[in-house]
Amino acid sequence: MVAATAAAVLTCCSSNAPGRPTTDATIEIVAPAPNAVVGPHVQLAMQLVGARLVSPALTGGAINGNEGHIHLLLDGQLIAMPYRLDIDLGNLTRGTHTVEAEFVASDHLPFANRPVAAVTFAVR
């Protein structure tokens, strides 16, 4: 069994995006838990506070700090832009995995204060 390392759930500091809008939103990954050892079929659950999701297809118009969508990465690779706060990650390979979720503006670019959550877990 591979032990998972702890991962932080946080709202990051400043970004390299001068002139970008900010957001009061926070995002958290509530499942799987940090260091969890799970089966290969993984259900991801997130919590978004202070904002609402809009469709990733809606990219025009004014950018609003309390509207956006999520970019979801698994092991550093973009895998989805879900319109929901829960997603089936499917059958993952055995070993340690890290999933990262970032709440981004409706234009697919990060907010100046990047709300990001990450968790590392192991698949047995």
Image (cartoon, rainbow, N blue to C red):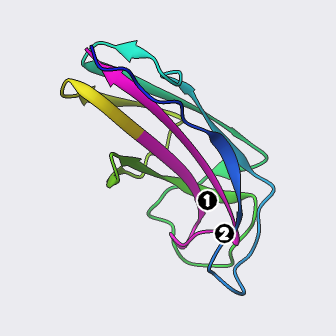
In the rendered image, residue 113, in percent from the top left (x then y), is placed at 72, 65
User: What type of secondary structure mainly makes up the magenta span?
Assistant: strand
Q: How crowded is mark 2: few (under 14 residues within 10 Å), some or many (20 or more)?
A: many
In the rendered image, residue 13, in percent from the top left (x then y), is placed at 73, 62
Q: Which amino acid does label 2 sit on?
A: Phe
Q: Residue furthest bottom?
A: 19
CB under 8 Å between callouts 2 and 1? yes
Identify the residue position indicated by label 2 in the image: 111
Q: How far apart are marks 2 and 1 (CA)?
A: 10 Å
In the rendered image, residue 43, in percent from the top left (x then y), is placed at 40, 23
Q: Is residue 113 inside the magenta stretch? A: yes
Q: What residue type is labelled 1?
A: Gly
Figure check: 82 above or below 77: above
Identify the residue position indicated by label 1 in the image: 68
Q: Is residue 77 inside the magenta stretch? A: no
Q: Residue at x 25, y 26 (%)?
A: 95
Which circle's residue, 2 or 1, is located before the other in the chain? 1
Q: Closest to the observer: 2 or 60?
A: 2
